[in-house]
Amino acid sequence: MRIGVVSDTHDRGEAVAEALRLFAEQRVELILHCGDIESPDTVLMFRDVPTHFVFGNWDKDRLRLAAAIKSIGGHHNESFGAIDLGGKRVAWVHSHERHQLYQLEHSDYFDYVFYGHTHVREQHKTGRTVVANPGALFRANPKTCIVLDTDTGEIKPLIISTPGKIGDSTHVLPGLRSHSVVGFPGLPTAALVPPIPDPPGEPAPE
């Protein structure tokens, strides 16, 4: 199964259209959006492919976004999602609430965890879990998204060719810390993330 992963679209219609065109070329069967959609107009562009969204810090009007997602037959999650795809356990999150990404990454439960927010494409592995940021379609150079093949495990980055704008840039992800334990809607209770100690050198949260 081929899964497209995209994040931080920020209402950049031209970039979204190009990403969707490339996803179609790659025969993507489902899309995960890691948040910062911004408006229902962007949601509607995903109508032709089953898409699961999470909300980011720039997704202010969540009622209208949720209605638009429902209208295209998509699914939305408030801050993170978890799903079984092609026999693989997959989670995705925006990551502006940093403890959520930390816990998903260190739960030793998921095969893949995808996140956004930083506008920086990167990939690493923590234990059994491949953690990847698809990059962004706004304020990123280059603009990127990715395709996961659950059969082979390959993650293929795609470069989105659109005219750049002054101010396009990247920034890095600040340090992550643990916080309260989170669970995974729709998964067995055994899938709850176990308590995780704070990263070394950081005090326990109040």
Image: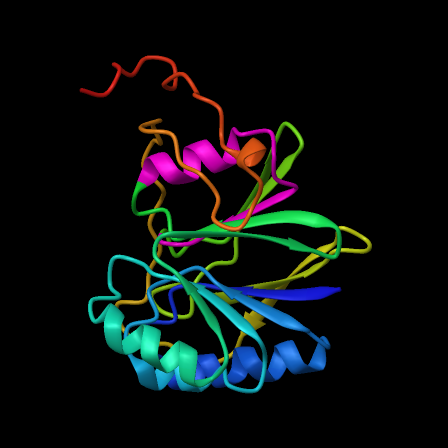
Task: Describe residue 31's horizontal placement relative to residue 11 as left or right.
Answer: right
Q: Quadrant of the N terminus?
A: bottom right
Q: Which residue is depicted at the point 52% across and 58% down?
A: 134
Q: Does any portion of residue 141 appear in the rendered image? A: no
- The part of the image, by quadrant, that contains residue 166 is bottom left
Q: Position of residue 137 (x, y in %)?
A: 42, 70
Q: Name the residue located 33 percent from the left edge and 49 percent from the top edge.
A: 171
**Front-most of residues 150 and 188:** 188
Q: Nearer the viewer, residue 170 or 130?
A: 130
Q: Position of residue 173 (x, y in %)?
A: 36, 42
Q: Is residue 113 magenta?
A: yes
Q: Position of residue 39 (x, y in %)?
A: 28, 78
Taking the view exactly as shown, the residue that stands out farthest to the front is: 189
What's the residue at 70%, 48% (across, down)?
88
Question: Which corner quadrant holds the C terminus?
Answer: top left
Instruction: Give left or right: position of 178 versus 122.
Output: left
Quadrant of residue 176 in the image? top left
Q: Position of residue 69 (x, y in %)?
A: 41, 77
Tell me: 103 left or right of 203.
right
In the rendered view, would you say 127 is above or below 118?
above
Question: Which residues, given as a range, are shown in magenta?
Answer: 98-117
How many numbered discs? 0
Colouring convention used in this rendered image of the protein: rainbow
7 is higher (above) or lower (below) than 16: above
Is the residue 28 above or below the residue 33 in the image? Answer: below
Q: Does residue 89 appear in this view?
A: yes
181 or 196: nearer the eye? 181
Question: What residue is shown at x 39% (from left), y 85% (from top)?
Answer: 13
